[in-house]
Amino acid sequence: MAAHIPGAGTPEGRTPEEIEAARKLFAGPCDFISGAASVESLPPIALPEVAFAGRSNVGKSSLVNALTGRRTLARVSARPGHTRQINFFDLAGRLHLVDLPGYGFAQVSKSMKETWQDLASAYLRGRPTLKRVCLLIDSRHGVKDSDHETMKNLDRAAVSYQLILTKTDQLRQAEIPRAIKSAEAAARKHGAAHPEVLPTSSETGFGIPELRAEISRVALG
């Protein structure tokens, strides 16, 4: 399903061949390989990595499942703050997908928030194989203060990242271009942010083929 919407900006070209190659890649074996709750337990640096970050309950686990065509690869919880470690998945022996703990969840102790933040910061600054961070933004709410803070941290770490809108199925069709333009305006304020914003829905599959192709291009191109 094409993700481009008239009036929402011009996406980078993705050929049908690139879309199909990415579909085949993500249809391949994808296995959980490691969960790191401390810097010491991070797995050895090996394959290219693409990480997924975002506010708690933004839909990170659902998006990872949608990308890989699986229902339970990444655990989905109705309780925000469920992901408490950095989870690594091996995709077809070619790249690693990395699920980072969510941020911005108020009902977590300050010490726990600091622990997660320190772990995520250490990972982001210490992985030369990290090709991009997909920073997920709930399309219904737009870029929040905590998202801007994360973007500033990524800027300082010189980590390339791209804003990915989630839950667009919960918007009216006319609202999606406005959500994209608003996120693009936020991205322009940050030096390490990729200019293109990709809208997605894990429920309907909207934008998933394009995101697969973008990840494949960045990690393996």
Image (tube, grey):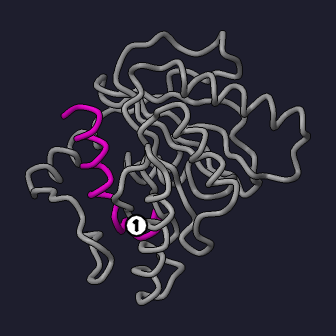
Helix, strand, or loop for circle 1? strand
Q: Nearer the viewer, residue 173 or 8?
A: 8
Q: Nearer the viewer, residue 33 or 201?
A: 201
Q: Is residue 199 above or below residue 118?
A: below
Residue 5, x across and y down, in percent: 29, 78
The location of residue 78, given as percent across then percent down, is 72, 58
Q: Is residue 191 left or right of residue 6?
A: right
Res 82 → quadrant = top right
Residue 172, image x and y in percent? 48, 88
Q: Is residue 208 magenta?
A: yes
Identified by mark 1, the residue type is Pro
Nearer to us in this view, 167 or 175: 175
- Dividing the picture into quarters, in which one does residue 181 lie? bottom left
Which residue is found at the position 72% from the left and 27% from the top? 118
Screen quadrant of the C terminus: top left
Residue at the (27%, 57%) spot, across then down? 209
- 30 above or below 164? above
Q: State the extent of the magenta-drawn residues as a range.
A: 200-221
- Residue that badge 1 annotates: 199
